[in-house]
Image (tube, grey):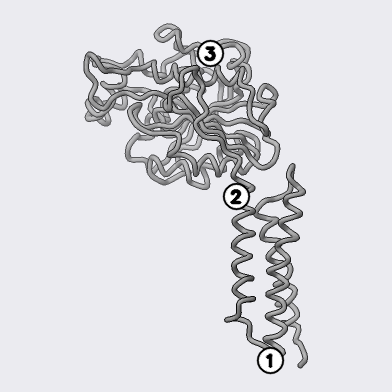
């Protein structure tokens, strides 16, 4: 029986496409030997598929219900899963950054398959009272595919119902984050992340996390001197990404007055004005790297924190650092407050800012 050009194309595609899928899933890089092995293994289901096509077209056999054909499908699944797991299993959870083991003072590390070009520290939000590093595994995994080592710390949280005996207020949350950043300076690292002092570090905060990082990297020493970073931290951190942040608390309460009882009082105490806790008024911090780059992002679909917060922070940062050092995106993303973190445009903005896209 003669084969048509279409039949030949099907056979070639059956052999070539499975290994290509494996190869593109992983890319090529430091673990090239594993990539080659998986590519070779990927030919096996391709050859089985080609055999099925040849025999089926020739009318000699129909393999669609045979053990061999089912084995081919199973092999494809195994190779695909093996490829993905080998690519992304280099994550390390619950690493303590204080002498005393505490889940709220530990971090997770996600290391890319190829040698990292940068380190990104992500500080989660949650109104200073909720949230956990484990909630952002998908975000960290996505960012770690672009040659960025992603570190996600926890920090202690304010109680939902504070009392005179039980309270945890600003700047304590930010102090935990600064403790983590200081810890990184002397951390021995991981097998695939040893050269920490040689890599640029970027920090990214979402919602309350944006406020926390702003309080550290702007000069809050007049009100919270405990948030002064060491010279080494200041030198190694090259840029700050702020997303859906809270910066001017008094302005926030004018727009959302119920937030006072919901979380502001628990996180900052009971005050008539929260001017001292508003980072959009802080001066520029001097030091070994006072020429920081900033990226301010806000979604026009955010109903929990209005864009006026980011507009105020953008204007303030540009008055301190100039327009060239402060990038913004305040109307391109159009999803809800927490959904921003997995929005493809947001991920692109972050990767571009870090310099790996």
- The residue indicated by pointer 1 is 59
Q: Residues within 10 Å of mark 3 (few under 14, many from 20)?
A: many
Relative to residue 116, is residue 329 drawn left or right?
Answer: left
Of label 2 and label 3, which has the lower sequence position?
2
Relative to residue 171, is residue 21 drawn left or right?
Answer: right
Determine if residue 34 is in view: yes
Q: Residues within 10 Å of mark 1 (few under 14, many from 20)?
A: few
Of label 1 and label 3, which has the lower sequence position?
1
Toward which corner of the image does residue 231 lie, by quadrant? Answer: top right
Q: Which residue is drawn at 73% across and 48% down?
A: 28
Q: How many labels does the image show?
A: 3
Pinpoint residue 96: horizontal percent, then vertical percent. 50, 24
**Residue nearest the observer in this picture, 51 or 317:** 51
Q: Which residue is drawn at 22% across and 26% down?
A: 261
Pinpoint residue 234: horizontal percent, then vertical percent. 58, 16
Residue 279 higher or lower than 300, as above or below: above
Q: How far apart are marks 1 and 2 (CA)?
A: 39 Å
Q: Quadrant of the N terminus?
A: bottom right
Image mark for residue 213: none
Residue 356 higher or lower than 98, as above or below: below
Q: Distance between the residues labelled 1 and 3?
A: 75 Å
In this rendering, the label closer to the viewer, 2 or 3: 2
Q: Which residue is drawn at 26% across and 27% down?
A: 160
Pinpoint residue 124: horizontal percent, then vertical percent. 44, 32
Toward which corner of the image does residue 226 lie, by quadrant? Answer: top left
Residue 211 higher or lower than 109, as above or below: above
Of label 1 and label 2, which has the lower sequence position?
1
Image mark for residue 229: 3
In this rendering, the label closer to the viewer, 1 or 3: 1
Q: Residue at x 53, y 13 (%)?
A: 229
Q: How far apart are marks 2 and 3 (CA)?
A: 37 Å
Image mark for residue 85: 2
């Amino acid at each position: 029986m003669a084969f048509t050009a279409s039949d030949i194309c099907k056979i070639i595609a059956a052999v070539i496409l499975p290994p290509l899928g494996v190869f593109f899933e992983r890319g090529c890089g430091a673990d090239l030997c594993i990539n080659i092995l998986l590519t070779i293994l990927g030919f096996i289901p391709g050859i089985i598929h080609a055999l099925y096509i040849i025999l089926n077209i020739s009318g000699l056999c129909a393999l669609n219900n045979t053990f061999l054909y089912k084995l081919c499908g199973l092999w494809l699944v195994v190779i695909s899963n093996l490829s993905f797991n080998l690519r992304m299993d280099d994550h390390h959870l619950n690493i303590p950054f204080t002498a005393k083991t505490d889940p709220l003072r530990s971090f997770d590390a996600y290391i890319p398959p190829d040698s990292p070009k940068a380190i990104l520290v992500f500080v989660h939000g949650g109104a200073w009272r909720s949230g956990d590093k484990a909630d952002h595994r998908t975000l960290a995994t996505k960012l770690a595919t672009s040659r960025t080592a992603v570190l996600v710390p926890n920090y202690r949280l304010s109680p939902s119902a504070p009392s005179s005996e039980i309270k945890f207020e600003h700047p304590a949350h930010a102090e935990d984050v600064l403790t983590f950043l200081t810890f990184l300076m002397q951390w021995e690292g991981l097998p695939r992340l040893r050269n920490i002092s040689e890599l640029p570090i970027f920090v990214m905060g979402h919602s309350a996390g944006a406020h926390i990082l702003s309080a550290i990297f702007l000069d809050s020493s007049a009100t919270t001197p405990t948030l002064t970073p060491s010279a080494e931290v200041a030198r190694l951190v090259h840029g700050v990404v702020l997303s859906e942040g809270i910066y001017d608390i008094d302005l926030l309460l004018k727009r959302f007055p119920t937030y006072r009882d919901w979380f502001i009082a628990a996180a900052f105490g009971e005050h008539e004005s929260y001017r001292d806790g508003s980072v959009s008024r802080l001066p520029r911090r001097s030091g070994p790297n006072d020429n920081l780059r900033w990226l301010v992002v806000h979604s026009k679909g955010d109903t929990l924190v209005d864009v006026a917060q980011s507009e105020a922070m953008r204007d303030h940062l540009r008055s301190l650092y100039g327009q060239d050092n402060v990038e913004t995106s305040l109307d391109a993303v159009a999803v809800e407050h927490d959904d921003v973190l997995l929005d493809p445009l947001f991920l692109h903005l972050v990767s571009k800012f870090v310099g790996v896209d």
